[in-house]
Image (cartoon, rainbow, N blue to C red):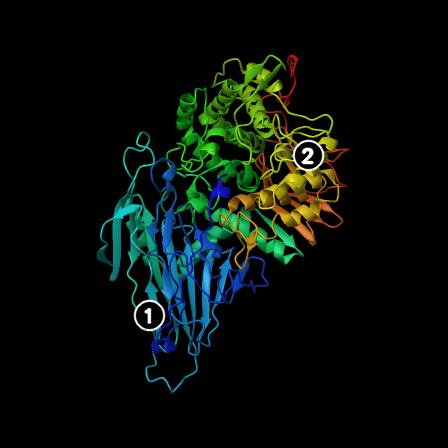
Amino acid sequence: MWHFLAQNKQVAAMLGLLSAAALVTIILATKGVSYAIADNGKEETEDISPVAHIFSTYSLPNTDKFMPSIGNGHVATNIFSDTVYMNGLYNGQGGYSHRARIPGWANIRLNSTLTHHPFSPVYSLDTREGVFKVRVDRDRSVVTQRIYAHRYYTRAIVNQIQVDSKTHYDPNFINQEIWIAIKLMPGEKSKDIDFHEPTPEIIDGRTIWHSCGQTMESEDLTYQPLPVEVCAFWTSVPDHLVVPQHGSRVFTFAMTADTNKTLARLELVKVLQEDGEELFQKHVEQWRNLYHQGGIDIEGNLELGKIVNGIWYYFLSSLPSENSHQPLGRFYGLSPTGLARGGTFEDYEGHNFWDTETWMFPSILLLYPKYANQLLQYRLNTAYVAGQLAKLTGHKGYRFPWESAYTGVEVTQPCCPDVATYEQHISGCISYAVRQYLATTRDEAWLEHGGCDIVTNIADFWASRAVINYNTGLYDITTVMGPDEDHKNVNNSVFTNVVAGYSLYLAQYVSCLCKSYYMAKDPDHYADIAWSLALPYDVEHDYHPQFSGYERGEEIKQADAVLLGFPLQYAINESTRQNDLTYYESVTRDNGPAMTWSMHTIGHLHLDDGKAEATFNKSFEGFVREPFKVWTELRRPDSGATNFLTGMGGFLQTLIFGYAGVSIHLDRLVINKPTLPPHTTKFTIRGIKYLGANITLEVKGNSTKISVVSMDDTWPLMLFDGKHNISLASGITVLLPGPGPFTIHSEPWKNCKLPADIIGQNYLRPIGT
């Protein structure tokens, strides 16, 4: 990506002091998008919670960067932000496209002076319930604010303020009522959406406001001739709430947003008709259902357990709800900083990159394959635009843009044309994600409804990019850029050529799977090209130069050639892989992203060379910001993009594909050398989905076992433990002896021959490979 060109920006605002009325109020007042919550001089504060899924603090970070988000895949916001974003809502033409800001009509604040009052508010993010809470224990009452993006009423962001009176009587108070001052802080008018003046109406005795407007600029007039209309509804917010001296009460406020005005209104009405506690429980139930499907449990290492829980929370917050009151619209992908961010250059403007398929997709696929399907569907929905881009650049098939958003056209910022021009490996990364999806699901319906087409057309693109070099007998792919963005316009990038080769081989394989309903022209020709794609290799040093002409000693930005070992799992000698890791660790610059060290960790674990813990620590230390486990793209003291889902995705892969030893292949799932992460006593991955089966993998210090929760009769599974084949069935538990490898497999899929997956051969491909 292009973040190394971005300039870090940080704005803080002074915390306003209130008058004597604060003696009977609670204060949490702050400014909008970038604000100072606690004037403690610290960007990060301490997480005081002893519970792995709850992050709590007495004082908030003094920058919006490290504030947590709430979201449900349709709408999202940062806590105490004056901005709401909606899935698929963008404004700006071409490279200026970015998430369109909706004013924060959900940003309701309790008012008080934290520094001058005896109260000690506790701020908590509960990742299991998907809610942010503020709790203030006062003399006469306990006030709790709950803020959440409803997981069932998915157009809604909900604020609930619960006031619980204390029983004792204080004669010093003449007015026995409890007053709580609150304020709605939506921020300035949107510069992205031309909202009309808000209009009030009375519904069931409550004043409701709404405003509709259109985005200012279309992303591309060819594919989006008209702007997008969006409507928001929200409840009127009084200056204060009044509660009797005794008892308790819950006040519910909400905001909804959608491109359909009627739907947004109906959703708000339904939310307000619900009993307050039942409304919250419906939301919590959806989150509990998600975590019941899968997750990673860490015992013995609270810090690591919290980090993992935070990652899954932030991932799922940006993914659509599985069960919603109103039907969901089209999904527009998972961007590097999630749905709650993306209005600025610094947060990648909500665009989709290779980050989705390479860094986030694999872990999501293994635990939540339905979401993996939706991520691929975004690519299918924009494939025709990728076809036009290939034509414009003189190639065949589908060339996916480096950055895409609403329409699927190239939306890379004008500042950074090189990445848009050269980082063509994204098309190969999409094909590789498809490969993994097919390997774990064998989803015939997906193939029939676009999968065959996208695989074949990506192969057509690479076939048109590969040019025979008669001096070497190999095909060259020239003028590209690999993941290392410090080197542009290079030839035969090893990463690019391997993903291109995999794309070509996959098209040959899929032509067999799809032959009853999709015809590919001469699919074996794809394999011929892949077989003879150039693969730079230095015999003297037994390593892979990053590209043709790479000179040893040149510094690089991030993991590139080492990605051949993982995630690509390209077949190379152990000595070569060791040399790739050792050499590139010595020339990778210090301020690169976290994913680099995640991949190095996996490499060291696979080689069992004793170096994994050091790189594992580098993969998260300095990137995870307290107290809400928000990841930054760059290590302290820098920050770059936040909340960086890309780095989180690399870290999850370290646990699943490194320490747990899981690997996905077209014909099998392998568990090899499972081991505990540092300073843990138990490591469990719940809900591994493979060919319809639901499997739990549990690793302890002296044992590893798998438990089959459920099976799909379509694909009977066998476990080979090195000596015996064991038939798997629902309810069975198998102890895995030794380090493995252990292989879970089924019968061949349609008896289609697996691809050779070999490149770099300057002789004819043998018949039958």
Q: Is residue 209 above or below residue 731?
A: below
According to the image, label 1 marks what residue? Answer: 241
Q: Nearer the viewer, residue 304 or 706?
A: 304
Q: Nearer the viewer, residue 498 or 733?
A: 498
Task: Answer with left or right where residue 371 lies relative to residue 622.
Answer: left
Rounded to the nearest whole Å, what is the CA distance between mark 2 and mark 1? 64 Å
Identify the residue shown where x is 38% and y is 87%.
171
Tell me the element at label 1: strand
Identify the residue shown where x is 48% and y is 72%.
120
Q: Can you say which quadrant of the picture contains the C terminus?
A: top right
Identify the residue shown where x is 62% and y is 33%.
561
Q: Is residue 22 above or below residue 517?
A: below
The image shows residue 399 at horizontal and vertical percentages of 46, 26
Mark before the other along the chain sequence, 2 or 1: 1
The image shows residue 444 at horizontal and vertical percentages of 51, 27
Specify the amino acid type for callout 2: Asp
Q: Nearer the viewer, residue 731 or 5?
A: 5
Q: Which is more foreground, mark 2 or mark 1?
A: 2
Task: Answer with left or right where residue 671 lies relative to residue 476.
Answer: right
According to the image, label 2 marks what residue? Answer: 580
Q: Quadrant of residue 352?
A: top left
Specify the amino acid type for callout 1: Leu
The image shows residue 666 at horizontal and vertical percentages of 61, 28
Q: Name, please, the residue furthest toward the bottom.
A: 171
Label at residue 356: none
